[in-house]
């Protein structure tokens, strides 16, 4: 039986051991039995809160993990996705039968995004100072580009990549950066086989989202050689340098895949679990409209999350926003009232606004449309090449037209 202690860092900086994860060895099919229980001291603490208000309410009981991974989904939210997991596995030289979620949490230790840290009775594969000084950004980028292209960096660059690139989420290469003012950022790097200038496109899309009324993290583009790196300020870090606990919509919905959920279910989660539902419902509605307008078809459940702040859960800033560069056409999430996966027109979105009592829903749609009229100007501002703008033009303009009055 493996035991992992779970620590949560509160927004004001206090650290609490909040519970324990218990897991058995994988069976012959790789499935793991596991459970979680809160500590009595945490349950009695004045700042206690449910790590997962749906599946782990505050109670003095053992919660079985009804998942083959052996851990509750909220803990898996702390783990990186494809890029970071690959590096975690290589960093710890894990054999195939060791490449499971409990072992990865043990390796992750204190270095994940969000407020949770994990400690085992054996020695953690823990790394201190896991955000690289901004002066090391070029070396970190060079190491990431080589590794992504299948070229093994030298030992020093590989250590840099292990230390600062193995914990962020997402499928693309990333690293953690600390600026001279001690602010913490995620650096997003190009991939070897990119056919679009993804970093410039994401920066431009974030700018359009901001003009549309969405809450977004601070960001900036940094030029390294001929390529540009996108820096996005971490929104899991509180002003006091404490942490905000993060939980994905995939976890809150107990969804095992991305493809059988629609936006209605996200609205329902916010209605039941947000500490500021009227604000968050409007923000989710705005993001849904913006995703339709810009063509952000990668609107899966891991790209929506809630943060626990001082008074409760609220929706996070919008992140991972891009036009439909892979020409999927269909959105990952279905739209309400049986509208399916293709972008709905204005009347369908207005009906969603009426059902969820979104104040001024028509004005929100107009604000998004007005912002999107500037899309070419904004894309050029962020140095998106003309040929890429041309490739996206038909789809984006068609989407905007469908939302006009």
Image (cartoon, rainbow, N blue to C red):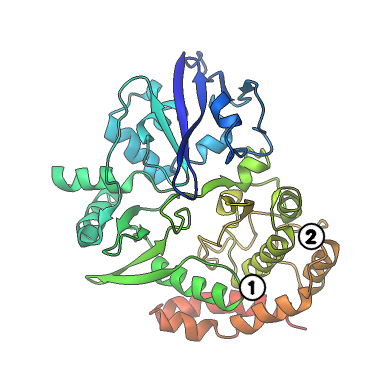
Q: Is residue 88 left or right of residue 207?
A: left
Residue 127 x/y as whole percent: 28, 38
Cα–Cα gap, marks 1 and 2: 16 Å
The residue positioned 78% from the left and 77% from the top of the image is: 362
Q: Is residue 129 visible?
A: yes
The residue positioned 40% from the left and 72% from the top of the image is: 200
Which of the 4 quarters of the picture holds residue 102? top left
Viewer-proximal residue, 317 or 336? 317
Front tag of 1 and 2: 1
Residue 243 x/y as whole percent: 46, 49
Viewer-proximal residue, 25 or 19? 19
Q: Residues within 10 Å of mark 1 (few under 14, many from 20)?
A: many
Q: Is residue 68 visible?
A: no
Residue 267 x/y as whole percent: 74, 55
The residue positioned 83% from the left and 65% from the top of the image is: 357
- In the rendered image, the vertical position of residue 349 relative to residue 175, given as above or below: below
Residue under label 2, please give it. Answer: 339
Which corner quadrant holds the C terminus? bottom right
- In the rendered image, the vertical position of residue 68 relative to residue 275, given as above or below: above
Label 2 SS: loop
Q: Is residue 326 left or right of residue 347?
A: left
Marking on residue 52: none
Residue under label 1, please give it. Answer: 293
Instruction: Decide which of tag 1 and tag 2 comes sooner along the chain.
Output: 1
- In the rendered image, the vertical position of residue 360 relative to residue 283, given as above or below: below
- In the rendered image, the vertical position of residue 259 relative to residue 22, given as above or below: below
The residue positioned 31% from the left and 57% from the top of the image is: 177
Which of the 4 quarters of the picture holds residue 224? bottom left
Q: Residues within 10 Å of mark 2 (few under 14, many from 20)?
A: some
Label 1 SS: helix
């Amino acid at each position: 039986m493996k035991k992992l202690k779970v620590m949560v860092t509160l927004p004001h900086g206090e650290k609490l051991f909040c519970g324990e994860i218990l897991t058995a060895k994988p069976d012959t099919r790789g499935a793991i039995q596991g459970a979680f229980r809160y500590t009595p001291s945490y349950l009695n603490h004045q700042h206690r809160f449910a790590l997962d208000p749906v599946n782990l309410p505050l109670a003095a009981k053992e919660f079985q993990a009804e998942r083959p991974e052996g851990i509750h989904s909220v803990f898996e939210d702390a783990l990186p996705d494809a890029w970071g997991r690959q590096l975690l596995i290589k960093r710890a030289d894990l054999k195939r039968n060791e490449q499971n979620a409990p072992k990865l949490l043990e390796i992750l230790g204190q270095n994940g995004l969000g407020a949770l840290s994990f400690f085992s009775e054996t020695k953690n594969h823990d790394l201190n100072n896991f955000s690289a000084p901004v002066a090391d950004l070029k070396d970190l980028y060079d190491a990431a580009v080589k590794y992504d292209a299948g070229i093994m960096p030298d030992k020093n660059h590989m250590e840099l990549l292990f230390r600062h690139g193995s914990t962020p989420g997402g499928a693309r290469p990333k690293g953690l950066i600390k600026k001279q003012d001690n602010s913490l950022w995620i650096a997003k790097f190009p991939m070897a086989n990119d056919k679009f200038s993804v970093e410039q496109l994401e920066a431009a899309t974030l700018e359009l989202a901001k003009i549309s009324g969405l809450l977004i993290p601070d960001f900036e583009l940094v030029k390294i050689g001929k390529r540009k790196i996108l820096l996005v300020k971490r929104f899991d870090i509180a002003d006091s340098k404490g942490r905000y606990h993060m939980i994905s919509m995939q976890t809150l919905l107990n969804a095992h895949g991305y493809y059988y959920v629609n936006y209605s279910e996200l609205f329902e989660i916010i209605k039941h679990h947000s500490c500021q539902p009227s604000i968050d419902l409007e923000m989710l509605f705005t993001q849904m409209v913006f995703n339709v307008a810009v063509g952000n078809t990668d609107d899966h459940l891991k790209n929506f999350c809630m943060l626990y702040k001082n008074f409760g859960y609220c929706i996070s800033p919008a992140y991972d926003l891009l036009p439909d560069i892979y020409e999927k056409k269909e959105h990952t999430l279905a739209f309400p009232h049986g509208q399916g996966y293709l972008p709905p027109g204005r009347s369908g979105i207005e009906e969603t606004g009426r059902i969820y009592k979104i104040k001024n829903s028509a004005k929100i749609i107009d604000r998004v449309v007005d912002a999107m009229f500037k899309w070419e100007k904004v894309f050029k501002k962020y140095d998106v090449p003309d040929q890429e703008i041309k490739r996206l033009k038909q789809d984006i303009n068609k989407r905007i037209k469908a939302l006009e009055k």
